[in-house]
Amino acid sequence: MLERVVARAREEEAGVLGVAAFGSYARGEAAPASDLDLEAVLREQPQVGYRTWFVDGLHVSIGFDSVERVRASLAEPARWSLKLAVEMPARWIEADAEARSALGDPPDFSRPPGEPELEDAVEWCAKALRASESLPLRVAARGLGEEAPALLRDLNGSPRVRSRVEAVRAASAFAVAPDGWADDLPVLLGLAPADDARVRDAVERVGRGVLRLLREHGAEVEQPELTRYLHDGTLERHLGFA
């Protein structure tokens, strides 16, 4: 089956240098519902960057991209990992010397962590606390839930994750975190049932707690002025906490 998939990739796009598998199949952890994640590496840009095939009942997801763009994308954080570093080993199904030289043998599709954004977290918190309707409250709460783990990441050993589920589990398990964090983070992300009052409570606890922990640990953030606002209480006053 893999031979047929590689042959089809070469038929669809000219100049395929190699095809690598990543995700659950590459890790040997595939379940019956898992799809086969593949990346076809080309010398030039593809005509179509992504294709979905069903082969012998298996869902195959295959990306096509140039070596240059694959290497550039691997230097960027993953969008799904709550800004945690991603560990993504891969395996060549078939590759020539050029592909192996460019991406390693075996290849490694790991991604770096995302940059913490305190300003974004504070503004999501502010929007949630000031929301007068359920939908804007929950949208803003989710924004806070997606930004808060990165702010606490370095206080918790900077874990590496391999999937969306691992990212949520790893972030929820942070030991250095606001009171109620393990229950509040899934609420913020919309992964646990909660009424609006519960969401507001989670927003306030996480907002207060993250600012307190950053201050207690002497954090410096992306802007000098923002570091000063963190430590002199300006951010708490902006959020109505002081």
Image: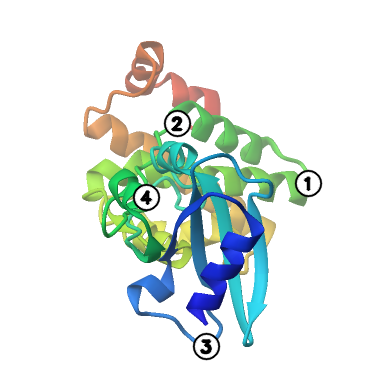
Residue at the limit of the structure toward the top, as seen here: 225
Numbered mark located on residue 117 in the image:
2
Q: Label 2 is placed on what type of residue?
A: Glu
- Given residues 9 and 207, the one toward you in this image is 9
Q: Secondary structure at mark 4?
A: helix
Q: Which residue is mark 1?
A: 133
Q: Quadrant of residue 45?
A: top right
* Alpha carbon separation for disc pair 1 and 4: 52 Å
Q: Label 3 is placed on what type of residue?
A: Pro
Q: Residue at x 57, y 52 (%)?
A: 64
The nearer-to-camera label among 2 and 1 is 2
* Alpha carbon separation for disc pair 2 and 4: 35 Å
Q: Which residue is mark 3?
A: 32
For disc 4, the neighbor class at 10 Å (few under 14, some 14 to 19, many from 20) is many
Q: Which residue is mark 4?
A: 99
Where is residue 216? Give x, y as percent. Answer: 24, 33
- Does any portion of residue 180 appear in the rendered image? no
Which tag, 2 or 1, sits closer to the chain's start? 2
* Alpha carbon separation for disc pair 1 and 3: 41 Å
Where is residue 82? Give x, y as percent. Answer: 45, 49
